[in-house]
Amino acid sequence: MCGISCILSLANPSRQPSQGQTNGNGTHTNGNTPSSKHDKLKSDLYASLEAIRHRGPDGTGHWISDDCRVAILTPPPFAAAIALGHVRLSINDLSPTGAQPFHSPAHNIHAVVNGEFYDYDNLRAHLEIETAKPTKTNPNGEPYPFTSRSDSELVVALYSHYGLTFTQYLRGEFACVIYDARKDLFIAVRDRYGIKPLFWTMQEVKDEEGRHTGEKRMLVAAEMKAFLPLGWEPEWDVRSLREGGWNFDTRTSFMGVRKIRPGHYMTCQSSGQIEERPYWDAEFPDKHVHDPRTPNEMIEGVRSRMLDAVRLRLRADVPIGIYLSGGIDSSVIAGMVAHLVREQNVSVGCASSVSDVTSSSKVNDPSSDIISTASASSRITCFSIAFDESSGYDESAIANRTAEHLGVKYIKKLMNEAALAERFEDAVWHCEQHNPDLNFVGKFALSEVPQEEGYKVVLTGEGADEIFAGYPLYLPDYLREPDRAWEEFCSLPESERQVQLRSAEGVAREQYRAIGADAGDGSDSVARRMLNGISTVDSMAAFQPDVFASWTKEQHPECDPQTTIASSVDGLARTHIAKNWHPLHAALYVWSKGHLPNIFLTCLGDRTEMAHSIEARTPFLDHFLTEYVNRLPPSVKLRWLPKERRFVEKWILREAARPFITEELYLRKKHPYSAPTRWPKGGALHRLLGGLVTEESVAALGFVAWEKVGGLVEVAFGEEADAKALRMVLVVAEWVVLSRRFGVARARAW
C-alpha cells in the first residue's frame, strides 16, 4: 500500500510528454520550463506527500510533465499541467525497480498506484503472450518490456494493451491514477468495494496578486490532508453532515471534496470535461428463478474460492500477519492460513525477515501492554486487541483459544481507558471523519502492534458480514419475502415467516435503542418505497446526531439521511431491487454502497491501518469470491433451524469454514466489533471529551447548537451513563478535533 497525490491543471490543451524517464524520481525540465517553477511545484508536491508519509515511509517518487506553466495560487504560486506524486510502502519488489511512478516504454503513459494486485504472475504471463502478437503498432511482435517485479507495473501494461477495459483484469484492493499524454487523458480508478480511498477536489487558479485567472486545477489524493500543502482551504459541508452524504454518497465532510465511487473510474481532460463511469457492480440472482444447486455444491464452491482468496494474499516480499478477534470471520482466515501452511507448504510472505516474536523485549513482560502466547517454531502470527474483561466487549479470550487450537503465535494489545484517550485525537485526524463509536480508536491502536513487531502486511476479516449477511439488522429484510429460489431446502413455513418478521423488526429497533441509536419506528417512507420496503435504511441512519443549529435546518430543510441512501443507489440497481432481487440481497447491496466503504473500510480499515504503515488485505472482498456468494440463494446466508427455532447468520460460511475453526466459533452468534460505552466520571475519557466539547469549541464549529450539547458530557459518563449522549459527545468532539487539525473555518448561514 502507498500514498498518492496528483495535480491536473485544466484549460491547457498543448502538452508534450517527457522523454527518457525511468521509474521513480526524475528531473523533468526543458528549455521552455523555468527550473524555478518546476522546483517550486516539486517542493509543493513533496510537501503534499509528506502529509501522508505514514502511507509510504520507504520512498518518494514523482513525475511532472514538461509544460510546467504559471498557474499562480495563494499558496503555492505555481502549478503544472500534470504532476504525479507517490510515497512508497515496499511490499513487492523491494528493489529500486519497484519505485513509482511507472512509465510506458514510449514514456507517454504514466501511473501511480496505491494497493495490491493479486495473481499478477499469471496476468503478467498472459500479457507477455498477448502483446507478443504482431500488430500494426508492434509488427515484430515484441512482448511488453516489464522493468520490475512489482504488481503495480501491470497497470501501465494493461492500459497500454486494453485501454479503459484494463479495469476488468484488476483483482485486489487498489486506487490508481494514469495519465495518457497521447490523448491528454487523466484516469483515476478505485477498487470494486472501496477498500482503498481516493479523493478529489477542484481549485480556482489565481495570479500573483490573488486574482482568479479563470483556470482551474484538479487535486487527487489518497487522503484529504494531502490537499492542505497545495493551498486547499477546507470548509464544512453542513448539508452533507446533516443528511449523511459523507457516508452514503460521494460527498465528504468538507465542501467540494468528493470520493470516487467504488467500482468506478473517473476521466478528465485539460478542457475540464469530467466523467465518472462504473466498471463493475454487484449482481444478485432473480428471486423468481429456481436455483438447482445442492447445499454441498454451494458449500464446496464457497470453500474453494475462499481458500484461493486467502492463498493469493499470502504472497509478499515482507512478513504477513493476521488480525484475530473472537469472531468467526478473522478466525476463518487464521484457520485457512494454518491449513495452507501445514498442508500445502504455502509461505506466509517473507517471514524470514522478522525475528521470532518471542525474542521481543515486550513480549510477556509484565510491565508491557503486549502479551504473546505461542511456540517459537510457529510460522503464523496473529494480532488482537483486548478491552477490560468487565466491559463486556472483550473477545480476546476466545481469540486466545483459537490461537492455541491452531498453534500460532498470538500477540494482543491491552486497551484501557487511558490508552483510548491518549490515541483519540490522532485516530480522528487519520480517519478524517467522525464516528459515533470508539471502536476506531481500538483499531488504530491494534495497528501499532504489527508495526512494532516488524510486520507490514496483515490479513483481516472485513467484508464477511456484508457478503454473507452477518449483521442482525439483515434478518427483517430476509423475512420480508419468501425465498422462492430455494424452496425445497428452505425449512421456514410461510406462517412462521410472517410471525418471525414482526418479531425481528421489533427486536432490531430495541437493540439499536439499547446501544444509543434510533432505528425509527418502521413506518413507511419514500426512501423505503424506493428500495422495496427494506428496513436496512432505518438501521444505516440510526446514528445521525441531533445536535445541529437551527439555521442549518432553515437553510437545508429537506435533509433526510434515508432519502440520501436511497437516492445514491444506481437507478438500474433500484429497478432490480424493485422487481428482481430478494429484499435480503437489496439490503446487502445498499449497505455495501454506504457503510462498508465509508465506515468499515475507512475508520475500521485503511485509515487506521495505514496510519501505522500497515497494509491490510481483505480475502472476503475478493470479487471472485463475492460474485459467487452474491449468486447464492438468501436462505444459505441466513438459515432457519426449525428444531432450535432460531436463525443462523452466515450459515454457508460456517459450513464452508468448519474444517478450519473450533466448534466454539462454529456455534457462536455474531457480536459486532464495538468499544465499551460505559466509562467512569473523572476518568481519562471524561476529562478528554470535557476539554474538547466546550461552549467555545462548539461555537467555533458554527453548525452545532450549544443548547443541545451543553451538559451532555456529564450525562454520558458515570453509573447511569446514557449511551446516546456518549455517541453524540464523541461526534461533536471529533468535529472539534478535525476543525483544529484541518484549520476549518467556522460554518455560517448563507
Image (cartoon, rainbow, N blue to C red):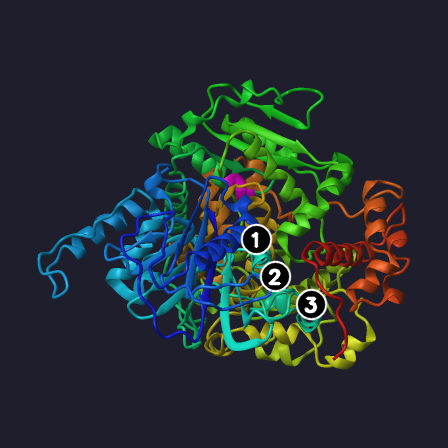
574 left or right of 679 in image: left
In terms of secondary structure, where does tag 2 sit?
A: helix
- Which circle's residue, 1 or 2, is located before the other in the chain? 2
436 left or right of 33 in image: right
What predominant SS class does the magenta segment belong to? helix
Percent across and percent down for residue 610 are 55, 45
In terms of secondary structure, where does tag 1 sit?
A: strand
Residue at the (78%, 64%) spot, across then down = 701
Find out whether the residues at labels 1 and 2 contact each other: C-beta distance under 8 Å.
yes
> Given the image, on which type of amino acid does mark 3 rest?
Trp
Residue at the (26%, 45%) spot, across then down = 147
Marks 1 and 3 sit apart, C-alpha to C-alpha, by 39 Å
Percent across and percent down for residue 213 are 53, 77
- Quadrant location of the C terminus in the rendered image: bottom right
Marks 1 and 2 sit apart, C-alpha to C-alpha, by 9 Å
Find out whether the residues at labels 1 and 3 contact each other: C-beta distance under 8 Å.
no
Find out whether the residues at labels 3 and 2 contact each other: C-beta distance under 8 Å.
no
Q: Quadrant of residue 148?
A: top left
**Which region of the structure is painted magenta?**
328-332
Residue at the (66%, 58%) spot, across then down = 433
Q: In this view, does 88 lie above or below 217?
A: above
Residue at the disc numbered 3: 236
Percent across and percent down for residue 657 are 46, 42
Residue 649 circle label: 1
- Which circle's residue, 1 or 3, is located before the other in the chain? 3
Tell which tag, 1 or 3, sits nearer the viewer: 3
Along the line of sight, the residue nearer the viewer: 269 or 612: 269
> Is residue 334 visible to us here?
yes
> Given the image, on which type of amino acid does mark 2 rest?
Leu
Residue at the disc numbered 2: 475
In terms of secondary structure, where does tag 3 sit?
A: loop
